[in-house]
Amino acid sequence: MKIGIVGLGLMGASFAKALKRYTSHTVLGLDRDPAVRESALHDGAVDEVHEDPAFLSQCAVTFLCLFPVQTVAFVKENLSHFQKGSIVADICGIKGYVVNALSQMELPFIYLPSHPMAGREVCGYHGSLESLFVGASYICTPVDAPQYAVDTLESLVRSIGFTDFVVTTPADHDRIIAFTSQLPHVISNAYVKSPSCSKHNGFSAGSYKDLSRVAKLNEEMWSDLFLLNRESLLSELDTLLQNLAQYRDALAREDRDALRDLLREGRIIKEECDQ
Amino acid sequence: MKIGIVGLGLMGASFAKALKRYTSHTVLGLDRDPAVRESALHDGAVDEVHEDPAFLSQCAVTFLCLFPVQTVAFVKENLSHFQKGSIVADICGIKGYVVNALSQMELPFIYLPSHPMAGREVCGYHGSLESLFVGASYICTPVDAPQYAVDTLESLVRSIGFTDFVVTTPADHDRIIAFTSQLPHVISNAYVKSPSCSKHNGFSAGSYKDLSRVAKLNEEMWSDLFLLNRESLLSELDTLLQNLAQYRDALAREDRDALRDLLREGRIIKEECDQ
């Protein structure tokens, strides 16, 4: 079948390359940047590139690989172009905002809100990889989409490397993602602001590397994602600040028992959560 | 030559196994637990095991693989047993406390305070690995030890897999380690205390795993290490809390520009620190 990819950045071009590599589907790409269109065609990441979204009427499945605000704007402006009854998935890191915005429109397609759990610390077409999704988890929040559409999407994304397909609600997605993904990005970005950071070389067995990895982020995208999930992230940040203050206070008053109990509690939670 | 290993836990037994695997030195181990002594001998991790520290008089190099307070107590009680002029290295994660305590004693040996940057989320003899130090960094704070002793130690630890040998002062070590190692353990342990933690499966591309990895720690050892480096760790914690509060406040007042600027600042620091 024909699969449309809207936006050939890190994620979109990785979808295109993976589909070309692992499936026999025809991949049609759209990007506003002529240089990206040329690279994608030259690299064989797509079968065709387009500037005009009219080609979407040919696509049985379309992946919208844009930032949240752009995703909503693109759908609104191009409603008439999508194939009637086709499957359209977005890839936005927050779901409540996008799902709410699209639910205000009369959609000609079956919308499958999605969040592929994959990324890199580089962005844009030139960061894309055909192997980006190998072993990754694909989250889908179908709301009331028909099961056959969910099944079609699941089978398609499994064919390009995803090994988990998690179905949940937009609200649960946004709450959990605030903890598993957004909070680590804030912590990591704040962590490296210590004056000791520049001296880290040779002084870590991996803790520094793990903790600072996602400090290198796309600040435009993440500030939008954070604001669009403001309440959940604020709640996670407040929980963390309160917890950290407990360790800080036990340390300040040299209370070894309290410190050890706090650490034991965390160790046990970690062991239980990973079972 | 004969090398003594005092304490056959995770670190000591890994030293023993690595020395047996990668060198032709004779390895003599001491442990108070008969079951550990038996396992070590049975596994060929050591050439001899001892309960009585008198054998240390045969050792040209000794690694003290004990927790900080035990290290100081062991040296104090066994001063007469060490070979005169031999090299003795400890492995404690904080250096100021141990160096200060040992400087009060009349040491018959050349003391090379050390901190091998390697570990695992399991402890004890049964967690030990001959490959634990491959690619790792060995920190040494020799104070006024003679250079030939430092060179001997460097060459020995490089032969068992260490690829970096960092020489610094106890004070600098303790300040930097508070940031690169201690702070990540506190953050990680506090992070998993969110009510969302139990639902993390399938909701992360690696951020959760990286951030929560060291939450599984030995709370007895780490509470001692934190308290013995209290001022440096408190200062790192306060810096982090202040920085995190800035993101929190920008998010709370929906100030996108401030949030983006905070994130950009962190991204640039991370890029610069890893150059």
Image: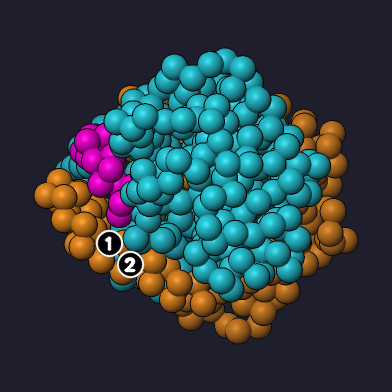
Chain colours: A cyan, B orange
Name the residue: 59% across, 59% down.
A50
Q: Quadrant of the N terminus of chain B?
A: bottom right
Residue B264 is tagged as 2
Please say whether residue A114 is visible from this viewpoint. yes
Q: Which of B258/A129 is in front?
A: A129
As for residue A233 lying within the magenta part, the answer is: yes
Where residue B192 appears, as percent x and y from the top left, is 39, 33
Badge 1 element: helix
Residue identified by numbered label 1: B260
Quadrant of res A126: bottom right
Would you place residue A227 above or below residue B42 in this image?
A: below
Q: Which of A191/A176 is in front?
A: A176
**To which chain does the residue with label 2 belong?**
B
Amino acid found under the numbered disc labelled 2: Arg
Where residue B75 appears, as percent x and y from the top left, is 51, 54
Name the residue: 33% across, 67% down.
B264
As for residue A29 lying within the magenta part, the answer is: no
User: Share a chain, discs 1 and 2?
Assistant: yes
In the rendered structure, the answer to whether residue A250 lies left or right of residue B127 reads left
Q: What stretch is highlighted in magenta?
A: A223-238
Label the magenta part by its dominant secondary structure: helix
Amino acid found under the numbered disc labelled 1: Arg
Marks 1 & 2, CB-CB < 8 Å contact: yes
Q: Which of A241/A29 is in front?
A: A29
Residue B120 is tagged as none
Badge 2 element: helix
Residue at the extreme bottom of the image, as rendered: B147
Where residue A103 appears, as percent x and y from the top left, is 33, 29
